[in-house]
Image: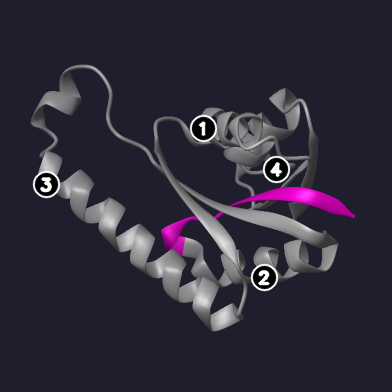
Amino acid sequence: MYNKIIVPVAMDQLERGEQIIRRAVGLLAEGGEIVLVHVIEVATGYLSIEFPAALVEMEIQQAEERLGRMRQDLGISAVIDIRYGGSARQIIAAAQEHKADLIILASHRPGLANYLLGATAERVVRHSPISVLVDR
C-alpha cells in the first residue's frame, strides 16, 4: 500500500482519469492521500507573449472545477494541484514536492513516434525517482 499517490489527469481524458483514480484508491494505505495533478502546457518563448493570460486563468478555473466535481462524484478526499509547464517534468516535480511514493498515470494508444508508451508516460517512467504505474 502507498501513503501518497500522484494521479495526473488530463482534461481531455476525464474518463481515463476516473479509471486511474479508482485504481489509486485501491492502492492507497489507510490514512493515505491522493493528489490530483493537472498540467497546463503554456507556450514558451515568443509564443507566450501572444497567449492571453485570461485564457490561462480560465483553464485553471475549469480544471479546478472539473477535478473538484470528479473528486465529489467519486466520493474521495484528494488534494488538487494545478501546474504549468511540461507535463512529465511537472508530474515528477509534484511527486517530489508532495513526497509521494507512487505515480499512477494513463497512457493513450501510442503512435509510431512513441510506440510502447505515450510521450508523457514514457518520460515520467524514465525520469521518476519513485515507482510509476502506467495504466493502459
Residue depth check, mark 3 versus mark 2: number of the one nearer the observer: 3
Query: How dense is the environment of label 4, judged by Cα within 10 Å: few (below 14), some, or many (20 and up)?
Result: some
Left-right relation of 129 to 66: right
Q: Which residue is mark 3?
A: 54
Q: Residue at x 44, y 75 (%)?
A: 69
- Magenta residues? 1-12
- Picture disc at residue 90: 1
- Picture disc at residue 117: 4
Query: How dense is the environment of label 1, judged by Cα within 10 Å: few (below 14), some, or many (20 and up)?
Result: many
What's the distance in space between the residues labelled 2 and 1, CA to CA? 21 Å
Residue 25 vs 9, above or below: the answer is: below
What's the distance in space between the residues labelled 4 and 3, CA to CA? 33 Å
Residue 117 vs 13, above or below: the answer is: above
Left-right relation of 99 to 27: left
Tag 4 secondary structure: loop
Tag 2 secondary structure: helix
What's the distance in space between the residues labelled 3 and 2, CA to CA? 31 Å
What's the distance in space between the residues labelled 4 and 1, CA to CA? 18 Å
What's the distance in space between the residues labelled 2 and 4, CA to CA? 17 Å
First in sequence: mark 4 vs mark 3: 3
Q: Amino acid at mark 2?
A: Gln
Q: Residue at x 74, y 26 (%)?
A: 126
Tag 1 secondary structure: helix
Residue depth check, mark 4 versus mark 1: number of the one nearer the observer: 1
Q: Nearer the viewer, residue 114 or 5?
A: 5
